[in-house]
Amino acid sequence: MTEATFPQCRISAERLLNPETTERLLNKLIEVPGIRRMLLNGQRLPAIIPYGPAKGLANPHPMRKTIKVGDQDVELQVHVGNVLLELENRESIPALKAACESVFTDFTFRIQEGRYMKTEPSLVDYCKYGPDADKEMLGLADPSSKSKPVILQGIK
Amino acid sequence: MAYKPQYCAGQTIVADNRRKQMDPAHKLEKLRDVSDKDLVLIMGHRVPGSAYKSAHPPLAEQQEPACPVRKMVTPTDGAKAGDRVRYIQFSDSMYNAPCQPYLRSYLEAYRFRGIDPGTLSGRQIVECRERDLEKYAKDLVNTELFDPALCGVRGCTVHGHSLRLDENGMMFDMLQRCILDKKSGIVKIVKDQVGVPLDGEVKVGKPMDAKWIKSHSTIYHSLVGTAFRDDAELVEYIQRIHSLRVKYGFMPKEA
């Protein structure tokens, strides 16, 4: 479980982000020391249409791409709208802001500080992961999700 | 003095645009020319060129009961031929799309005959006889009521109305029914309204520019357009309606 004392941030831009912009942003963000966890939030873009008359057909979507962050491939599953971050301390925030300013040149953005990830395991988390849950994963993914997190080598 | 409908209250450009769209005497500006065949493809109810399927025999061939109302009301072409009832549904972005779900229902009721419009939070559906629908759909897509980037013909998976636009200025669409060709700047529809891929693509023209979008908006939006609170007349009207409804709810004689 996350320590309640770790500050959290949310970066939201005026527009939903293209994969290329997301890639540029994340590559800038990972240069900032002190980011513990990061979550890309947005509208889901399923590879197969899950319902409706076209159910089962492939759903090619230009916003669902594999991007390269650092030297890791990250497969986007959403049209990125917000980036949630958990930081070691508040001192990283000015650097995050500077990183965003260098990427969002065509439209506005804002960084908010608040609580955006779970800080306590929910009942569903307990059912899924049990008492020995991987604390790094709590609040990052839906408990029914089978996807694993991408681990980026930090620069700490 | 003859009654002259006012359509809606308000002194801003948004209210003005709403009135224009609702007023059947106002001729909607034609902006693009999507062919009949392309519209049939987008809606996906029948193969272009195929016969209309019918729900009942043509009115001329079936025995009609003696009814004064039937004598008074001229049937539409679709009803006359006994066509099936089909639909077209639109999603409109709240980022200044030129038409909005509630307004669509109003204006269709003023302008079209034999329709069953239905408004939901971010989308609006209109049902009517198939050949009438194709005629009405032409007006809905080819005129100032439609913008290729901010409005979408979506039968299902309609999500997008309240979401931020993407970087290209297009409304979010999980099924990516229309694609913005960055080279030519033209929006191409590649799937029908329920997300089944089309054999070809239907070009619906370039998205309108920001100035046009702002001057043709029919939604109040404090961040990207005219704020609701800036329209004193409309606020006064809404407050009056609200107050009357509340009073009527408690004590009818005071309303």
Image: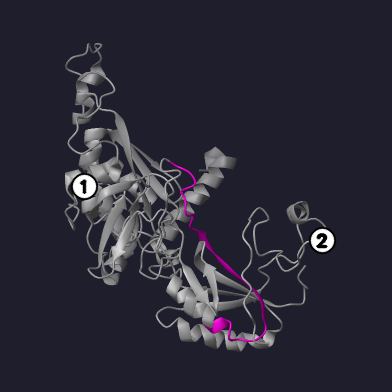
- Span colored in magenta: A28-52
- Specify whether disc 2 shares its chain with disc 1: no
The answer to whether A10 is drawn above or below residue B15 in the figure is below
- Number of the label disc, if any, that sits on residue A132: 2
Q: In the rendered image, is residue B145 in sight?
A: yes
| Element marked by disc 1 | helix
Front-most of A74 and B203?
A: A74
Please state the horizontal and vertical placement of residue B201, each as a whole percent of the image: 25, 53
Q: Residues within 10 Å of mark 1 (few under 14, many from 20)?
A: some
What amino acid is at disc 1? Asp
| Image-based side of B227 in relation to B197, left or right | right
| Image-based side of A154 in relation to B51, left or right | right
Front-most of B154 and B233?
A: B154
Residue A38 shown in magenta: yes
Q: Residue A152 appears in which quarter of the rendering?
A: bottom right
| Residue beneath disc 1 | B38
Which mark is in front, 2 or 1? 2
Q: Residue B231 appears in which quarter of the rendering?
A: bottom left
What amino acid is at disc 2? Asp
Please state the horizontal and vertical placement of residue B234, each as a whole percent of the image: 40, 58
The answer to whether A79 is drawn above or below residue B175 in the figure is below
| Element marked by disc 2 | loop
Please state the horizontal and vertical placement of residue A62, each as a whole percent of the image: 39, 63
Q: Residues within 10 Å of mark 2 (few under 14, many from 20)?
A: few
